[in-house]
Amino acid sequence: MVSSAVSMSVPLTIGKLIDFFSNANPQIPFGLSLGQASGILLFLFSAGAVANAGRAMLMRLSGQRIVARLRERTYAAALRQEVEFVEKGEGDVLSRLSVDSSIVGESVTQNLSDGLRSVVMASAGLGAMFYISPQLTLLMLTVVPPVSLGAVFYGRYLKKLSNRTQEALGDMTKVAQEALTALRTVQAFNSAKQEEAKFHEKVGTVLTLARKEAIASGIFFGATGWSGNVTLLALLGYGGTLVSRGTITMGDLTSLLLYTVYVGNGLQMLTVFFSSIMRGIGAGVRIFDLIDRQPAIPPNTGVEVDPSRRGPIRFEHVWFEYPSRRNVQILKDLNLEVNVGESVAIVGQSGSGKSSINALLMRYYDPVKGKVTFDGQDIREFNPSSWRSIIGVVPQDPILFTGTIASNIAYGNPDATMEQIEAAARQANCEFVWGMPQGFLTEIGRASLSGGQRQRLAIARALLKKPAILALDEATSSLDATSEHRVNDAIDKILRSRQTTCVIVAHRLSTIARAERIVVLEDGHIVESGTYRHLVNKEGSRFRHLMAAQLNAAAGEYPASALPPLTPPSEPEAVRPAAPEETRV
Ligand SMILES: Nc1ncnc2c1ncn2[C@@H]1O[C@H](COP(=O)(O)OP(=O)(O)OP(=O)(O)O)[C@@H](O)[C@H]1O
């Protein structure tokens, strides 16, 4: 208010000065000397400048705070969502976090600040103009309705374009992200050109939309500029006759013309403000859609699970299909029971739904029909966060985060002591860590870990939780014999301790043979269940069939003796030859 009031006093002052100096016998109001009057004006302008600086600073700062808070809330909301929503890119979280929040930021910082200033300037200017000459002011105002109408249409069009631009930008980012995270594959297949072409297409869409926006803004600003100049001309013509008639002075006309420029600028800024607010609203809607979204599996509602609770896991008549592929049934009336401390290996052809069983156990998804129970209670009744806290999970492709080896093992257990971290690492055969110059404080980025080492770190991470249940999804990727032996040895220790119920999605024969029980998954349900010895020796078993298929031999001709030597999981073993590469299931 202060800065705008000072700015708006400038045209009036200039008009008065012109009249003052064109007068043969000038009189300064209030009997001030010329020096005093100049001093007062200088003081007022300085106060206006300070207020202006304060306005810009405060508005920007508060706007940035709003943006920071929006970003944090968007991120937290994204982390709360069910995995499918984020992984399938439905939420387009990254573009909401970066682009949309910046747009909202721009709207609430600079534009809101300039917009408020324009409102004050336009209304104060109009007030002053009415005071000087109501006739000339009314003449000037004839231009306002058409310009405002144009501004409304322009704003709406811009909002629509802005939504489409954000979507196109999101698509563009996705294409780039996919290629950049798979740079090795892109280079291995020499597909840089192909990727460039995909990106070019997406950039093209953004550019087309930008072109439309450019054309619309060109027409709008061209038209408003033209109408502004025509108005000035009309004011000058009519104002000139009023001066010659002596209705207003030369100074008044000068002030009026200056006010017209100020008000015109104010109105133009208002249209920019309006269109930017429209764009901000579009982006804001996308952000609040995500913030307000109720996750399909809310992470913090339901009964807390006592960490010491133990009990069998049961899949009872479970039917399941992925939400994104509703017509493809993955599990059909699946029944499976895993007793306390038991280890069960799930085997089956690739794509048969083995990992989906673990995904249901982790409650990344809920069954379409049937239920999964723990200790007799449907796991849907549990608070998902609390339920997941009693499960140690080793995914197929373990993810390590930026940070030290220790912080990666302690991921999810930030309060773990160094002793606990070391104990878990020892249990998971991570002896390689002790051989590193900085040991557990080695940064992951510098460590260049092998596949087997990453898996063992992931096992250590899962073990540190002292989980009641271990959900292990064995890596399909190959490990060298020594690595595989170390990983298996680590798994073996867990199985033999019999303190953890283990559900293992197994691919390697050496792991399968270690489990107490093997279940064979086929066509969405379990077709066979038994110990390794039982299944291998059973004539025509699906398990033998599966093994034989993997070994590329005819099912019936495949002798059980050709399978690697068997050691029951409970017996400690010395050195087990690693299963041949082909025996992955
Ligand atoms: N998020 C998902 N959305 C849609 N379909 C999926 C999703 N994840 C897996 N599928 C599909 O579900 C089926 C079962 O997948 P799943 O990963 O459970 O198989 P799997 O037996 O573990 O395979 P593999 O041994 O190759 O790891 C596959 O056809 C797969 O394409």
Image: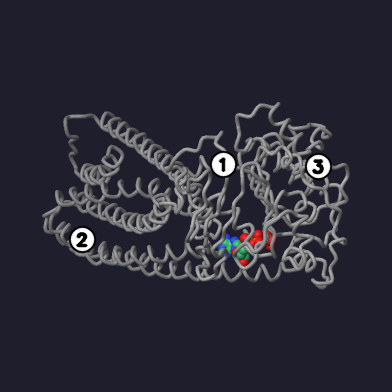
Residue 401 is left or right of residue 100, and the answer is right
Ligand 1 appears in which quadrant?
A: bottom right
Q: Quadrant of the N terminus?
A: top left
**Is disc 2 in contact with disc 1, using a CB cutoff of under 8 Å?**
no
Quarter of the view holding residue 427 = top right
| Percent coordinates x, y for residue 6 in the rendering | 28, 39
Q: How many neighbours does mark 1 have within 10 angstroms: few (below 14), some (14-19), or many (20 or more)?
A: some
| Percent coordinates x, y for residue 571 in the rendering | 81, 42
Q: Vertical placement of 566 versus 491: above or below?
A: below
Q: Amino acid at mark 3?
A: Glu
- Cα separation, mark 2 vs mark 1, equals 83 Å
Q: Secondary structure at mark 2?
A: helix
- Which residue is tagged 3? 571
Q: Nearer the viewer, residue 397 or 329?
A: 329
Q: Amino acid at mark 1?
A: Gly
Residue 531 is left or right of residue 279, and the answer is right
Tell which circle, 3 or 2, labels the residue nearer the N-terminal end: 2
Q: Vertical placement of 516 versus 55: above or below?
A: below
Q: State the residue at coordinates (67%, 68%).
A: 195
- Cα separation, mark 3 vs mark 2, equals 97 Å
Q: Which mark is residue 140?
A: 2
Q: Secondary structure at mark 3?
A: loop
**Is disc 3 in contact with disc 2, using a CB cutoff of under 8 Å?**
no
| Residue 173 in sight here | no
- Which residue is tagged 1? 311
**Is disc 1 in contact with disc 3, using a CB cutoff of under 8 Å?**
no
The image's colour scheme reads one colour
